[in-house]
Amino acid sequence: MRRIRAVVYGAGAMGALATRLMTEKGVEIVGAIARNPDKVGRDLGEFAGIGRLNVPIEADAEQVLATRRPDVVLHATQSFLPEIKDQLALCVRSGANVVTISEESFYPWSSSPGIAAELDALAKENGVTITGSGHQDSFWLHQVSALLGTAHRINSVYGKATWNADEYGADIIQSKHVGETLEQFQESMASEHRPPTFGGNLLSALAQATGLTPKEWKTEISPVVADEDRYSNSIGVTLSKGTVIGYADIDVMTTVEGPTFTFEMSGYVFGEGESDMNRWVVKGEPDLYLDNGRVPSYTTTCTQWVNRIPDVINAPAGFVTPDQLPPLRYRALPMQNYVTPGALA
Amino acid sequence: MRRIRAVVYGAGAMGALATRLMTEKGVEIVGAIARNPDKVGRDLGEFAGIGRLNVPIEADAEQVLATRRPDVVLHATQSFLPEIKDQLALCVRSGANVVTISEESFYPWSSSPGIAAELDALAKENGVTITGSGHQDSFWLHQVSALLGTAHRINSVYGKATWNADEYGADIIQSKHVGETLEQFQESMASEHRPPTFGGNLLSALAQATGLTPKEWKTEISPVVADEDRYSNSIGVTLSKGTVIGYADIDVMTTVEGPTFTFEMSGYVFGEGESDMNRWVVKGEPDLYLDNGRVPSYTTTCTQWVNRIPDVINAPAGFVTPDQLPPLRYRALPMQNYVTPGALA
């Protein structure tokens, strides 16, 4: 079987890492798309730090897609469906499958059902699949739904994930209200217009995979406050005890069948020795627990994005969310070995 | 859709708990089979402690199966396929699907391929499915393979599970060589004929679910020694520091593709505060980890056995191991709601 042809859409840190992972798994990268003039014209391999691939980063997405005819596009630009709708539509119209790490695309039916339905129809028309994946695919969906499969009765499910806001630069630090007093934080929250949280999408996917029907969602925001002085590398400032160092989005979903789901996602400036975590606590018969220790979220965002490639090629046409796909599997062999015979034209 | 009709084959602690779980999930229990004269003639519901069900425990398996025509048999008698082959064949010939917690049946292709092939052919002939499930289904297979799906490269996988030998009575305590000195234990190991360990079946299933090809297996036995005096409730004896309190089976599997898998299953007399554990450590890119905290193995053996009922009814005919089934799912509704339309005749 021939190699899978891929285009990288969005040349950021994630696209760079995925470029290396794909080349190590036999995927043929045939194009790269980015708008940033500092990146356009550079070689994707050199950008990714793995040596020349003879794949230039180009600005004209339509042109790249039309001339390179990829089997799949690995898409990583923005988080929300309204922002990326046109980009996904372009990929689909060119006849390419898409796997995106846009957070909302993981389960857009709860937050942007109209756009999701449009893209679903367009994908079906073109015989291709759009899927969202990333860190959440296994850690927040498939591992958790497998754990819930051992329950006789679920009363409540509580998940907590954390990430280090200090690793993502000064813009993110500012968006997380780092350095504000609690009073300033409350004022910011009262005035700020915030996009929908990702927890709602995640919990909807988890309900779907667990055979439950969402009834209501609500979101709370809870500041994280320094319990001792800690230093932020990305802004070069010591944050004194008592100041806000980030916050948690706490999403709560009730279901028609009874179980309540809570997901707390907390981004803040980590202290010495802290690491990303992923922990789930289930109350019911019996009580259940899952903890992934030190979670390498940055890497696992990319590994899952790349490991999903064969599933997206194999899947039926449409906007197919990961709760409808087989659980993620390890790919020991070159990626084309996992494609259903005949699925690569 | 009508209710699922089930027969309980084997009236032990597991059959009793499954009886309650099934009645709470709308399964109609139409028969019960056991050989023990102390149990034959008793009502299954009374035996299970949930009040009269008007289902007598009967000794004549063939008669029960022929007259009750169950959709599925929940089978829990012995561990090894040679011991239960005739029982499974009887169920299948009567036209019933079977889900068994016989450990070897979880993946019999590595240890009893001949019997597995015979039963597979017989099941296909009769249009029904045989599946093994139990605690291992989610905790040692589907949660772990979902975790492995986040890896770019796996070097090694190490799993460790423990169980409290003190909870299963004096016979088990004796079989675990509890109370022996290290010298006595080594002598016992040199002379004792031991059946194959379950780790080999488990690792084979995990390789299958991970897309890897087993190359070689080996098993080691490692004694667990008391690090301080501890009391065994089931034999009423204090075991002094330095004596054997059980042992671990350590199975190691190499694969053609490279990754090495180790599974250490340790049964011994627990001390104060110890609980069953399930912990997996993956070395590779990236390193990965999974820990289920205090694992209620006893309950989750039954919950998974029962939650697998719709999958076994829906599955294609044959001996279908859980690596070939969808991951276990929670069953919020009466069990027949998860059966594919038309699968219940």
Image (cartoon, coloured by chain):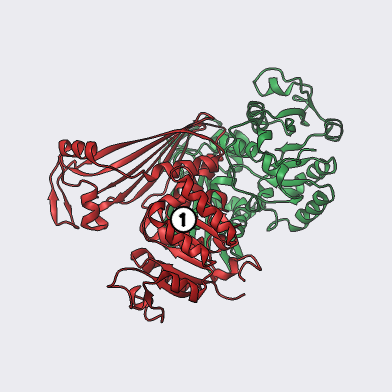
Chain colours: A red, B green
User: Where is residue A181 shown, x and y percent of the image?
Assistant: 15, 40
Dot 1: element: loop
Residue at left offset 66%, top offset 30%: B22
Find residue A168 and report its image quarter. bottom left
State whether residue A28 appears in this view. no
- Foreground pick, A111 / B122: A111
In the displayed structure image, the side of residue B21 where residue A167 appears, left or right:
left
User: Where is residue B20 shown, x and y percent of the image?
Assistant: 64, 26
Q: Quadrant of the N terminus of chain A?
A: bottom right
User: Where is residue A177 shown, x and y percent of the image?
Assistant: 21, 46
Find residue B7 and report its image quarter. top right
Q: Residues within 10 Å of mark 1 (few under 14, many from 20)?
A: many
- Foreground pick, B273 / A220: A220
In the displayed structure image, the side of residue A45 where residue A143 appears, left or right:
right
Above/below status of B285 relative to A231: below
Residue at left offset 56%, top offset 60%: A311
Q: Quadrant of the C terminus of chain A?
A: bottom right
Identify residue type, mark 1. Ser
User: Where is residue A64 shown, x and y percent of the image?
Assistant: 44, 73
Q: Which residue is under mark 1?
A: A133
